[in-house]
Image (tube, rainbow, N blue to C red):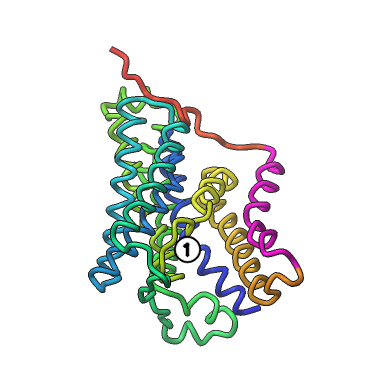
Amino acid sequence: MLNILSRAVMMCTPLMLGAMAEVYAERTGMMITSIEGIFLMGAFGGFVGTYFTGSIVLGMLIAILCGLVTAALYGGITVYMRQQQIVTGTAINILAAGFCAFFYRVLFGIPTTPLKIATLPKIEIPLLSKIPVIGEVLFDQNILTYFVYLIIPVSYFVLFRTSLGLTLRSTGENPEAVDVAGLNVNRIRFLTVLVAGAFGGLAGSFYTLGYLGMFTSGIIGGRGWIAFAICFLGNWNPKGVVIGTLVFGLADAVSIYIQAVSGGTIFPNELIIALPYILTIILTISRRSFNVPAKLGVPYFKED
């Protein structure tokens, strides 16, 4: 049970980063439907950067850069060219999948065995890691998971206790008022998308640098969309995101554990793998009310 809970916390890491980034972007009116592609580009950039430089730190920086560039493409098209966000995001997801598959073959050919890199080591926090149950679950993780612990309170404080958070929320609720206050609505949206892209790229790198130590074209496996769904199910609030992420992280950990124990003899592997996605559908259907930002997905046209 402790192993499952520890793995659940670990699997929460990328979902938390992606969902929290999505909350901030959607609060300004931007649905980052390219999140799956951003995750994939981050995973690819992190693997390639670490493989060629031998440095996980450089790998993470390249992953962040890849997420940033992908988000910049999405933001440029949707914010400044005012194209439909869902269609644009879907197209970029397809583009990212093709880009990673093509350049992986260009760089590495067709390896007979999967290429491997070192993954982030676990870091025991002195004293805290010795606390029964809690210590092993929460304080024997890698650096990215500890970074998420910091992100949770900071995200809530910034969004609801600072003037910056008020500006971001107002941009998604009443952009005209933000414009009248002398702020550039489209610039705010674009910069928020960039920041979300950087966090999404870091989240994607977790799967190559913090978990598997290898890259495949299906490594993300729809988890970007799960992070997207968690933002909705959490009602665009960091508190709700934390709860939703813990639920999905636990489902992911349980599915991995069942696969390892049963080996497909008790339940079909396909059914076990699908558990987190089935849970996404069930929770989405069961949710009755959403506090949707008023201008979510609506381009802003400045009045003359």
Residue sticking out furthest to the right: 266
Amino acid type at mark 1: Thr
Residue beneath disc 1: 13
For the point 43% across and 83% down, the residue is 124
For the point 30% across and 48% down, the residue is 68
Secondary structure, magenta segment, majority class: helix
* Nearest to the observer: residue 81 or residue 232: 81
Which quarter of the image is occupied by the N terminus? bottom right
Which quarter of the image is occupied by the C terminus? top left
Can residue 160 be seen by looking at this rendering?
no
Q: Name above or below for residue 215 compared with residue 79.
A: below
| Residue 61 shown left or right of residue 18 in the figure | left
Q: Is residue 274 magenta?
A: yes
Q: Name above or below for residue 38 compared with residue 189.
A: below
Give the x, y percent position of residue 47. 34, 64
Give the x, y percent position of residue 55. 26, 72
Q: How many marks?
A: 1
Residue sticking out furthest to the left: 53
Can residue 134 be seen by looking at this rendering?
yes
Q: Is residue 278 magenta?
A: yes
Magenta region: 267-288
Q: Name above or below for residue 125 compared with residue 81.
A: below
| Residue 237 shown left or right of residue 69 in the figure | right
